[in-house]
Amino acid sequence: MARSKLKRPDSRLPITLDLLKNIIKILPAFCSSRYEAVLFSSAFSMGFFAFLRVGEMTTACGREGSNHAIKIENVEVTNHNIKIYLASSKTDQLGRGTSIFVARQSDVGICPVKLLQEYLKIRPRISGQLYCHFDGSPMTRYQFSGILKQALGYIGFDQSKYGTHSFRIGSATSATMLGFSDEQIKVMGRWSSDTFKSYIRIPQF
């Protein structure tokens, strides 16, 4: 008889608003260029406030290999918000597509609108994946994870307790603590079931 595998509880910690602020603040200290610091600042902020999966911002390798990564052509920015058209996603394999809106934040240090505007000013004028390096190569999942780990280590956090999914965990947790309803959080994170509840990490005082 095959032994059933017990699913280990997800122990990854959330990226909180305060931690996001500290991560973005420290990026210029170790990123290889100003361009890279601006790139990852925007990507980290967008990942948090748009409830994005890492595969919606990156490719798995150094080529245009992701079907789900946001394309520059599908992004509209105003001074008040960002409109992103996701042509497909992990939970939309048929490619029906959906649009999400990301609002401006009062804290300019982590505001996704401001940080995306700064990034787009210096981004190469090429089509394809929204987040790319100065040479035009797409940002990869490995690079996204690597810079996140470096930032966490730089500010004294245990890197092993965080991962790329910590952004969505943090988004769901923050929304819950701000009083959003379960249905609102499901819509914001594009969850089709109550699985989002496993992402929520309410601090124990």
Image (cartoon, rainbow, N blue to C red):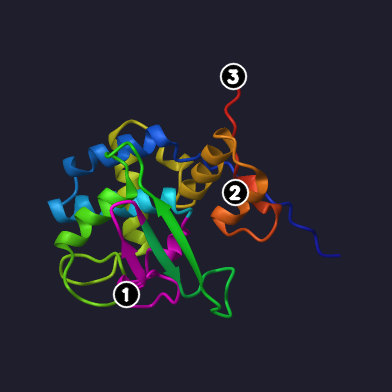
**Mark 3 surroundings: few (<14), some (14-19) or many (≥20) residues within 10 A:** few
**Residue displayed at 36% across by 58% down:** 82
- In the image, which disc is placed on residue 73? 1
Separation of disc 1 and disc 2 at Cα? 27 Å
Question: Quadrant of the rendered structure where residue 5 is?
Answer: bottom right
**Residue 33 seen from this side:** no
Q: Nearer the viewer, residue 2 or 192?
A: 192
Q: Which residues, given as a range, are shown in magenta?
A: 52-81
Q: Amino acid at mark 3?
A: Phe
Q: Amino acid at mark 1?
A: Glu
Residue highlighted by disc 2: 185
Dominant SS in magenta:
loop
Residue under label 3: 205
Q: Amino acid at mark 2?
A: Ile
Q: Position of residue 129 (x, y in %)?
A: 32, 72
Check residue 139 in the rendering and tell me which mark sits there, or answer none: none
